[in-house]
Amino acid sequence: MERPEYDLMASLEGSMWWYRALHVQLLSLIERARLPSGACVLDAGCGTGGLLARLGAARPDLSLAGIELDEPAAATARRKTGLDITVGSVIGCPTRPARFLQS
């Protein structure tokens, strides 16, 4: 994405109906998966961290991680979530993939 799109995302993902609806749907799916406490969840392409922030608030018992290709967006996600967001591509994922549950 281009820089203005990330800036727009960062400013709207807490209030815009589309992001709110998307986050509610994803949180519902995660709840239905009945992830145990301590389960690792990776937000691949986490953008500016809105989903990770909502997920952390809803499920503080999960181990959350994010990966984002764009360094400034990853920095925003770090500030928003307090997580160590990895900068990189999901194609060559620099995190340890085996730590995450797969379905």
Image: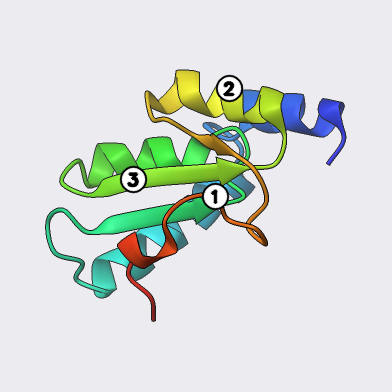
Q: CA distance from mark 1 to mark 2?
A: 19 Å
Please say if 76 is above or below 59. above
Residue lying at the far left in this picture: please name it.
Answer: 37
Q: How is the image coloured?
A: rainbow
Tell me the residue that label 2 is attached to.
76
Q: Label 2: how many residues lie within 10 Å, few (<14), some (14-19) or many (20+)? A: some
Tell me the residue that label 3 is attached to.
64
Please say if 17 is above or below 15. below
Q: Mark 1 is on which residue type?
A: Pro
- Residue at 60% from the left image edge and 30% from the top image edge: 74
Q: CA distance from mark 1 to mark 3?
A: 15 Å
Q: CA distance from mark 3 to mark 2?
A: 16 Å
Instruction: Work out whether mark 1 precedes mark 2 in sequence or the reverse, and give the earlier one.
Output: 2
Instruction: Work out whether mark 1 precedes mark 3 in sequence or the reverse, and give the earlier one.
Output: 3
What's the mark number on residue 94? Answer: 1
Please say if 82 is above or below 96. above
Instruction: Work out whether mark 3 precedes mark 2 in sequence or the reverse, and give the earlier one.
Output: 3
Q: How many marks?
A: 3
Between circles 1 and 3, the one closer to the viewer is: 1
- Residue at 16% from the left image edge and 53% from the top image edge: 38
Whether residue 51 sits left or right of residue 16 in the image: it is left
- Residue at 36% from the left image edge and 66% from the top image edge: 98
Whether label 1 touches label 2, CB < 8 Å:
no
| Residue 103 x, y percent position in the rendering | 39, 81
Which of the image's four quarters has the N terminus? top right
Between circles 1 and 2, the one closer to the viewer is: 1
